[in-house]
Amino acid sequence: MADEDGRVTSLLEAIKLPILRTPWRIDPAGADPAVVDFIAANLGLPVVGASDEADDRDTATAMPRGRRRQGRFSWRTHLAEVLTMLEFGHAYFEQVYRYDPEARQFWLRKLAPRPQATISKINVARDGGLESIEQAPPGWNGLAPSALAEVKIPVSRLVAYVRHGGSGNWIGKSLLRPVHKNWLLKDDILRVQATAIRRGGAGIPVVTCAKDDDKQVERAQQLASNMRAGNFAGLGLPPGWKAELIGVQGNLPDPQRAIESHDRAIALAGLAHFLNLDGRGGSYALASVQADTFVQALQAVAEQIAEISTEHIVYDLVDLNFGTDVAAPRIVFDEIGTRQDATAAALKMLVDSGLLVPDPGTEHAIRQNLGLPSAAGADAGDDTADSAPAVTVPSVGAAS
């Protein structure tokens, strides 16, 4: 659907792009600074309120400046892959680590996506929790050879994002499922509309012969079928013959209205009412209310992603390297659609009135939000081991 229909694509992009665009950060949440720095370095995300984050991290990519991307986890890439759960209802990833023998730490190398089309089975426990998934072997084309066993990935190595799951439902529900019938009907109407334009737009050639004779009727049929438009097109007829272009007559249904109706239904599936605004007038206040509902829906999707990634990426990293009783930071994001950057005049008024104290923490936060470098430079050297091998770590927690 997303690859063939413009309205479906615009709906998905309207949901995904704001979530991808909003800044994501690491909230210390009372954790030890060493733990916070370790998680931030693993995920390539800035720390909330950190004094040196804007200086040694690229604000556009959230990657440390001067550090190579190869072999390191990319949050932005992962987030884009997570959002495929909108189309499919679920998105599964396998945790892959690399071990640093000098520091004796496991670093997150990647969250390897397990594409939805390759998942052959989702195993669920009796209590409704996720047990494992089974992935088709390489080269699978729908019928796996008996010699190639399917790969089973246990829940301890999985990060599972499921849309509208629960009660043992680990497949989830696609955002597009309620409007699948609208898409099918719209696709059929588009084909009918194209046929109607081709056949009825210029009329159908009709040649009437002079008398009821099989040979004349056959000749008239040939003339009508060979009629073409052009600068030198013409037609010669015997006496008594007549040629004309006959269009469709009578009251005809308007396919465009039906197409627009299905487009509106598709937009409503994602609460994207504003996609149905066609510029023909209406209430700006109503449009604003509709946009607020859509932004709240985006916020809910981003909050689900932040919660799952915190519990099954951050917590697992902390459990592996620091212990299960150590406080862990959280993945957070700037609220979507409500940010209003303070102007210099507004900040001055807040300081003059005593409501804002220009301490170092406030300065760092302002520089962070505005994407400015920190006042003091920081060493952007790479403190990670590039040559450490990639490993997959056994159970550190359940994704269910």
Image (cartoon, rainbow, N blue to C red):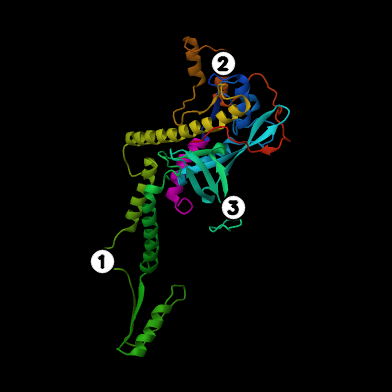
- Circle count: 3
Q: Nearer the viewer, residue 67 or 357?
A: 67
Residue 126 appearing in the image = yes
Pointer 1 or 3: first along the chain: 3
Residue 317: x percent and y percent?
Answer: 60, 30
Q: Residue at x 56, y 12 (%)?
A: 359
Which numbered disc, 1 or 2, marks the residue closer to the eye?
A: 2
Packing grade of label 2 (10 A; few <14, some 14-19, many >=20) is few
- State the residue position of label 1: 250
* The stretch drawn in magenta includes residue 182: no
Coordinates of residue 49 in the picture (x, y in percent)? 56, 20
Provide the residue span drawn in magenta.
1-20
Residue type, numbered disc 2? Gly
Q: Residue at x 39, y 65 (%)?
A: 195
Q: How far apart are marks 1 and 2 (CA)?
A: 75 Å
> Residue 69: percent from the left, percent from the top?
67, 37
Is 6 colored magenta in this rendering? yes
**Given the image, on which type of amino acid does mark 3 rest?**
Ala
- Dominant SS in magenta: helix
| Element carrying mark 2 | helix
Tell whether 318 sits left or right of 253.
right
Answer whether labels 1 and 3 touch (C-beta < 8 Å).
no
Q: Name the residue under label 2.
A: 361
Residue identifier under label 3: 149
* Structural distance between the alpha carbons of marks 1 and 3: 63 Å
Going by the image, does 96 lie left or right of 7? right
